[in-house]
Amino acid sequence: MLLPFIHCGIVWIILISYGWVTYGKDKSSEYIKNNYPEIWKKLHPWGDCSYNSFASFAFLLGKYDDGKDDILNNLKQRAAIAIGIVFWTFGLIPVSWLLNICALFLNKLI
């Protein structure tokens, strides 16, 4: 039953470590900051160290731009993939639980 939690923990540790190592070096954030300052202010309301997750979901859905900038669309696509990976790890937890419960019941039947 611990396998899903270990799996999530490993993915989260890798993503958080990667974020700390690349903090301030992120070219996508710099691109948004330099070319779309109004979007950057919505994503980072109190400066570089802050982050508004609600605004980031609206940004990924295309609420703040017209969708004509290919570089910005590529950045949104990469961010959506990263978020998908994080949610994918959480989606594995119920699957793993069901498989473990089925294995327990099959073990009792055999």
Image (cartoon, rainbow, N blue to C red):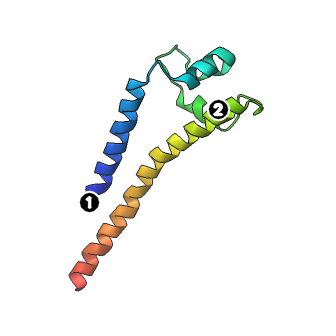
Image coords of residue 58 (percent x, y): 64, 34
Q: Is residue 55 left or right of residue 82?
A: right
Element under disc 1:
loop
Label 2 Cα neighbours within 10 Å, binned few <14 / some 14-19 / many ≥20: some
Q: Inspect the image, locate mark 2, and give the three-letter code of the amino acid beneath it.
A: Phe
Q: Quadrant of residue 43?
A: top right
- The number of callouts visible is 2
Quarter of the figure that contains the N terminus: bottom left
Residue 87 position in % (x across, y down): 47, 47
Label 1 crowding class (10 Å Cα cut-off): few <14, some 14-19, many 20+?
few
Is any part of residue 8 visible from this angle? Answer: yes
Report the residue marked by disc 1.
1
> x and y percent of residue 4 in the render?
32, 54
- Circle 2: element type: helix
Q: Amino acid at mark 1?
A: Met
Q: Which residue is mark 2?
A: 59
Residue at the location (56% across, 36% down)? 79
Measuring from the top left, give residue 35's x and y in whole percent.
Answer: 68, 17
In the rendered image of this protein, does residue 102 appear above or below residue 1?
below
Drawn side of residue 68 relative to residue 109, left or right: right
Q: Quadrant of residue 2?
A: bottom left
For this rendering, which residue is in front, 42 or 71?
A: 71
Visible in this render: residue 40? no
- Taking the spot 64% from the left edge, 15% from the top edge, the residue there is 34
For the point 45% across and 44% down, the residue is 86
**Quarter of the image that includes the C terminus:** bottom left
Q: Is residue 47 above or below residue 79?
A: above
